[in-house]
Structure formats: structure tokens, C-alpha cells
């Protein structure tokens, strides 16, 4: 299976499912964010994704941190006291 074949396959599946902009990078990005959201280690993630340094991994860390902050504001007990 070549990269181009995989790209075409994902595109066709996206069209059939009614989802636009389906491509391999979207799955890689989704994996990266969810990996960190679920407590994954940035050094392990770097190795899994084949990054040569932590620069790209840090991008995903920032996104996951923003998500965590939003989640805390939404569900944190102090922020939701009804006094």
C-alpha cells in the first residue's frame, strides 16, 4: 500500500461518509491530541510520530493544555459553585 493509495482510500471513504477534508494527516493530528489528552508522554509521542525533536510535539501539548483548561473551567468545582 502506497501513501497515495492510502490518501485516495481515505478521501473516498470521507466522501461516502459525507465528511470533507479527510486525509492521513487528520488522523495523525487526532491521534496526537487524544494521546496527550489521555495522559500520554510527550517523549513517547515524539518517537511514535517520528519527530526528530520536541518542537512539533510541543504544538500538540499546547492544544491539549488549552483543552484541559477549558474542561477544568467547565467542570471544576470552584468555578461552578452557586453561592
Image (spheres, helix red, strand yellow):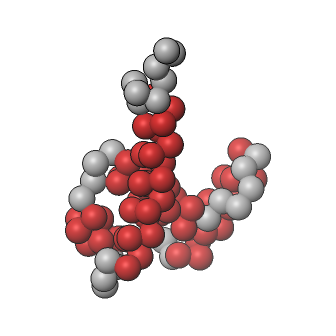
Residue 17, above or below 58:
above
Closest to the observer, 27 or 75: 75
Q: Position of residue 4 (x, y in %)?
A: 59, 76
User: Does residue 53 appear in this view?
Assistant: yes
Closest to the observer, 25 or 9: 25
| Image-quadrant location for residue 20 | bottom right
Left or right: 20 in relation to 83? right
Q: Position of residue 63 (x, y in %)?
A: 48, 59
Residue 15, above or below 2:
above
Closest to the observer, 38 or 11: 38
Q: Position of residue 56 (x, y in %)?
A: 41, 76
Residue lying at 37% horizontally and 71% vertically, measured from the top left: 57
Left or right: 72 in relation to 27? left
Residue 22, above or below 78:
below
Residue lying at 66% horizontally and 52% vertically, measured from the top left: 13
User: Does residue 31 appear in this view?
Assistant: no
Left or right: 11 in relation to 77? right
| Image-quadrant location for residue 47 | bottom left
Left or right: 25 in relation to 58? right
Amino acid at each position: 500500500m502506497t501513501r497515495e493509495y492510502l490518501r485516495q482510500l481515505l478521501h473516498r471513504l470521507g466522501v461516502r461518509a459525507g465528511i470533507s477534508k479527510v486525509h492521513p494527516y487528520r488522523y495523525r493530528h487526532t491521534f496526537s491530541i487524544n494521546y496527550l489528552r489521555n495522559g500520554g508522554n510527550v517523549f513517547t509521542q515524539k518517537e511514535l510520530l517520528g519527530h526528530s525533536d520536541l518542537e512539533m510535539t510541543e504544538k500538540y501539548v499546547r492544544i491539549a493544555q488549552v483543552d484541559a483548561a477549558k474542561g477544568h473551567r467547565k467542570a471544576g468545582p470552584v468555578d461552578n459553585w452557586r453561592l
